[in-house]
Image (cartoon, grey):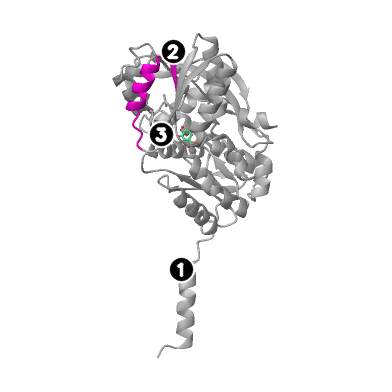
Amino acid sequence: MISRFSLLAAALGAALLAAPARADDNTVTIGMILPMTGPQASTGKQERAGAELYIQQHGDTVAGKKIALVVKDDASAADVTKRLAEELIGNDHAAVLMGFGLTPLALAAAPVATEAKVPEIVTAAATAMITEKSPYIVRTSFTLPQASAPMAEWSLKNGIKKVVTIVADYGPGVDAEKWFSDTFEKGGGTVAEKIRVPLKNPDFAPFLQRVKDDAPDAVFVFVPSGQGAVFMKEFVERGLDKAGIKLIGTGDVTDDDLLADIGDSALGAVTAHHYSADHDSPENKAFVAAFEKANNGMRPNFMAVGGYDGMALVYQALEKTKGDASGDALLAAMKGMSWMSPRGPVSIDPETRDIVQNIYVRKVEKKDGALYNVEFATIPDVKDPYKAAKH
Ligand code: DHB
């Protein structure tokens, strides 16, 4: 016969097994949620390596607290992102959530961050409105309007009169299309056609045939990190380069992680973005060398810098709060924070919680046999124009 005591003991045992290992008060757990598998896996790989490099360089103790980085793979599925966010907070007692490889994934975690009052550091996703979805979201990546409006300004001044836009059909693509087109048209340019392609398994070829028939001066493109190689291959296969059509865009299409694969067909592409591995500063040279050393020669792209700076933000906030890792204390410390990133000087806008940073105009060129986005113009201290327009 089973005694009441053994039933109780069994129940207790089960409860203990289910009970999460509570991190002691001296540990600050950072839950990083990224696509580590699937089509956006390059984002996860770069982001994680960036965050880990920061810890490696700065030690795993800040203001007397031990930093524990826990990385989870959401495979780009928003329902998984949300569940992982809940588990990281509920089971692992994460004090900070970080990562978010695509806009829908950042949005899925927003209500969880708000409810738990835990900072959500968006280090990858880049649709402008993301930071409006929770007062606990802070961003270290960029926004598409931030890069797209300067690209239009440059085009207007450089003899480009007629453009066709091609964007991935979701949040950041819609932002890129709107902020490029509105700025370009306001300055007297013509947008002959605005084409949107599906985010998943895009086939650009039929659209590119249409673009060739439109005979614009340039094609403006936004595709998420990782898809640039496919786009460029089809751009060349359809003969758009030979037809004299320039390739312009945000820097996502000439992603540093992909340039070597894309090859010479990328030569001459002009893009506007916040980071190039070729950025000429002592901080960036040290960053690129350390990153390549730690990752078998892999070149860092803008996702790596997003992860590195996300970690820089958490470390500096913890120093400012003297180790207080409560969400509201960290948020207050992050607002207005400024530092020198490998990309150049950055700060967190205290009103919007978005990153303020230089946008660089770059051209793909060959340097010592390798392709780089070579920066040739700087627009300093750019705030997200979408939010600036609302204020
Ligand atoms: C987003 C994803 C990307 O890979 C990128 O380069 C820009 C934006 C996004 O989903 O927000």
> Which residue lies under the disc numbered 1?
17
Q: Is residue 215 magenta?
A: yes
Q: Is residue 124 visible?
A: no
Q: Amino acid at mark 3?
A: Ala
Residue 3 falls in which quadrant of the image? bottom left
From the viewer's perspective, is the residue at label 1 or at label 3 nearer? 1
Q: Amino acid at mark 1?
A: Leu
**Mark 2–mark 1 distance (CA, rounded to whole Å):** 65 Å
Which secondary structure lies at badge 1? helix
Give residue 344's position: percent from left, percent from top: 57, 24
Q: Earlier in the sequence, mark 1 or mark 3?
A: 1
> Which residue lies under the disc numbered 2?
217
> Which residue lies under the disc numbered 3?
294
Which of 43/200 is in front? 200
Which of 163/370 is in front? 163
**Residue segment shown in magenta:** 201-220
Pointers 1 and 3 in contact (C-beta within 8 Å): no
Quadrant position of the N terminus in the picture: bottom left
Q: Is residue 307 above or below residue 346?
A: below
Give residue 74's position: percent from left, percent from top: 43, 48
Instruction: Decide: few, some or many residues near mark 1? Use Cα within 10 Å; few <14, some 14-19, many ≥20.
Output: few
Q: Earlier in the sequence, mark 2 or mark 1?
A: 1
Quadrant position of the C terminus in the picture: top right
Which secondary structure lies at badge 3? helix
Pointers 3 and 2 in contact (C-beta within 8 Å): no
Give residue 31's position: percent from left, percent from top: 51, 48
Residue 316 falls in which quadrant of the image? top right
